[in-house]
Image (cartoon, coloured by chain):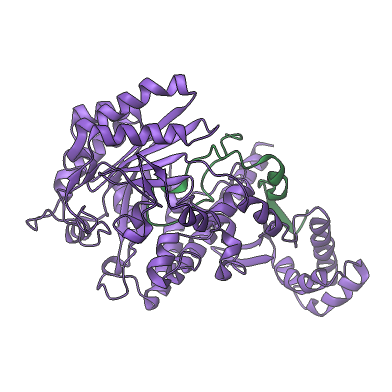
Chain colours: A green, B purple
């Protein structure tokens, strides 16, 4: 495309079908402990 | 739902429901908000859409460019990458009916601390109760409880937390040993982590931690005067000089991976980007510096009027990170890390932090709470390691906590990145867990914008590199 560059992202709609295994890290166990930060967690199935 | 913004010379359009991110030129940037209501009204006819944006044509915005922009926008709409509908609310309904398992524990191994940090939500380690250390027996029961209640989950997380967990180090070691002795037969894998202020950190502890702990969280606020003001010993003297060399050694010994130096900024150091830079200058490559959570009456609390300064600080920091990466001296800032390609599925993004369901805190006496922030508030006691969860009504309340249960989240573009925010913050400020802490939300939105801008800049750099190679 000439006017738009789309960054590669995970398709959230598709993730409804295969997601939800619950194996990924609990967000508060990462570093925060005072805020909720989920977008930076990685999927255990993808990594 | 679209969120578009300009940052550091980039025009960014986020399609919230699909998760797509687009970097666009000025023409598309103006076209998108004109097309959005048409699409929402079911209008997709090319000629009708072209006619609706014809008024944009002016010097610098020629008719051909506007036509092309519309075609590209409609193409992305057709591909489900722009103006994607919200299809998740019914999914949440199913989600609430799910049976939950416990997969992570925050073990309050020590309700005591050798520092007296001004902003400590644990009240100098005691959580507004009495000083206590967790016994091995209680910790063992907690691990057994976790294994027994984890269903088919394989990865189980246990954070040794406090107070200061190194004040009860032998029990930490014994519990790790116990966990390792049972994990294989149980078909589980423990991921242990340790959060420490560093005062008691030594080579023996580090060697053990590097072998057994998948992550270390090392508490330091940044510049010496900032750190020492908020993180003194009980006698008032600062702790910076003691801990910095220990933390530097820890970071190096872990190959600059799988740890965070983790700081808190307050009203006293609104120029916190200087603290992040200071930590990077000390050689740390994994950095997290986060806003304090405090009552509005606390003098160090972040105030509404601080927000413009803090937004600028995040912008400065984002540019600094890009500049340092360009110079080969990059570092990670926890809140700007965003995994666009391999990030969490929708189920994770909707269900939040898991407090009160998959994540529980355990006190030195073996009582269970929804998370470490609720410890000490009797009405949030959920059960104990002997009887398990007895307050199932409270667990069900936490189970229903998701972005659709929070009115303030519905129209927020960042809802699938923060997942509805911190339940404890909500409770502290509004008396219930389904609200949102506005200052925290404002800062989260800014962080997401900066994080996505960094991704856009890196994508552009990569593209330029590929062009040069061709």
> Is residue B281 placed above or below B269 in the rendered structure?
above
Looking at the rendered image, the quarter that the N terminus of chain B falls into is: bottom right
Q: Is residue B214 visible?
A: no
Q: In which image quadrant can residue B265 be found?
A: bottom left
* Residue B284 at x, y percent in the picture: 32, 43
Q: In which image quadrant can residue B90 be found?
A: bottom right
In this rendering, the count of numbered labels is: 0
Looking at the rendered image, the quarter that the C terminus of chain B falls into is: top right
In the image: residue B172, left or right of residue B446: left
Residue at position x 43%, y 70% in the image: B439
> Is residue B64 placed above or below B448 in the rendered structure?
below
* Residue B68 at x, y percent in the picture: 83, 63
In the image: residue B19, left or right of residue B429: right
> Is residue B442 placed above or below B164 in the rendered structure?
below
Residue at position x 39%, y 76% in the image: B304
Q: In which image quadrant can residue B250 be found?
A: top left
Q: Nearer the viewer, residue B111 or B448?
A: B111
Q: Is residue B239 visible?
A: yes
In the image: residue A22, left or right of residue B307: right
* Residue B464 at x, y percent in the picture: 63, 46
In the image: residue B219, left or right of residue A37: left
* Residue B437 at x, y percent in the picture: 44, 68
Residue at position x 45%, y 19% in the image: B185
């Amino acid at each position: 495309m000439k006017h738009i560059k789309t960054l590669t992202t995970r398709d959230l709609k598709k993730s409804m079908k295969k997601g939800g295994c619950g194996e990924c890290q609990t967000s508060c166990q990462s570093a925060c402990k005072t805020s909720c930060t989920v977008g930076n967690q990685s999927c255990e199935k993808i990594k | 739902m679209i969120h578009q913004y300009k940052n550091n010379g980039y025009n960014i359009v986020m399609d919230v429901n699909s998760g797509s991110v687009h970097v666009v030129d000025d023409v598309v940037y103006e076209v998108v908000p004109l097309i959005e209501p048409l699409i929402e009204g079911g209008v997709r006819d090319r000629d009708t859409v072209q006619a609706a944006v014809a008024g944009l044509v002016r010097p610098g915005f020629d008719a051909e460019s506007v036509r092309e922009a519309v075609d590209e926008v409609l193409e992305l709409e057709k591909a489900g990458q722009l103006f994607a509908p919200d299809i998740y609310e019914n999914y949440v309904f199913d989600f609430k009916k799910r049976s939950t398992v416990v997969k992570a524990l925050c073990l309050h191994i020590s309700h005591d601390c050798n520092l007296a940090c001004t902003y400590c939500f644990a009240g100098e380690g005691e959580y507004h109760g009495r000083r206590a250390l967790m016994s091995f027996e209680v910790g063992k029961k907690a691990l057994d409880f976790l294994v027994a209640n984890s269903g088919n989950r394989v990865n189980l997380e246990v954070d040794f937390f406090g107070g200061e967990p190194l004040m009860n180090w032998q029990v930490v070691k014994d519990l790790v040993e116990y966990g390792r002795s049972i994990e294989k037969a149980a078909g589980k894998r423990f991921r242990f982590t340790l959060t420490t202020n560093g005062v008691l950190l030594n080579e023996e502890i580090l060697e053990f931690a590097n072998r057994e702990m998948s992550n270390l969280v090392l508490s330091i606020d940044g510049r010496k005067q900032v750190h020492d003001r908020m993180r003194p010993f009980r006698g008032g003297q600062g702790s910076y000089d003691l801990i910095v060399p220990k933390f530097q050694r820890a970071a190096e010994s872990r190959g600059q991976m799988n740890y965070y130096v983790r700081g808190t900024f307050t009203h006293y150091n609104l120029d916190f980007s200087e603290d992040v830079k200071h930590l990077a200058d000390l050689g740390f490559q994994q950095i997290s510096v986060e806003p304090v959570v405090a009552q509005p009456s606390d003098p160090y609390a972040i105030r509404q009027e601080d927000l413009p300064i803090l937004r600028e600080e995040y912008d400065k920091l984002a540019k600094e990170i890009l500049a340092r990466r360009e110079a080969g001296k990059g570092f990670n800032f926890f809140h700007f890390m965003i995994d666009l390609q391999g990030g969490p599925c929708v189920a994770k993004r909707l269900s939040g932090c898991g407090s009160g369901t998959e994540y529980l805190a355990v006190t030195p006496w073996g009582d269970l709470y929804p998370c470490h922030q609720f410890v000490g508030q009797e009405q949030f006691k959920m059960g104990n390691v002997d009887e398990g969860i007895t307050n199932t009504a409270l667990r069900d309340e936490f189970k229903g906590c998701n972005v659709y249960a929070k009115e303030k989240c519905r129209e927020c573009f960042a809802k699938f990145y923060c997942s509805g925010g911190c339940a404890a913050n909500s409770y502290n400020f509004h008396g219930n867990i389904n609200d949102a802490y506005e200052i925290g939300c404002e800062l989260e939105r800014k962080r997401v914008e900066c994080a996505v801008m960094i991704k856009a800049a890196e994508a552009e750099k990569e593209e330029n590199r590929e062009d040069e190679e061709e």
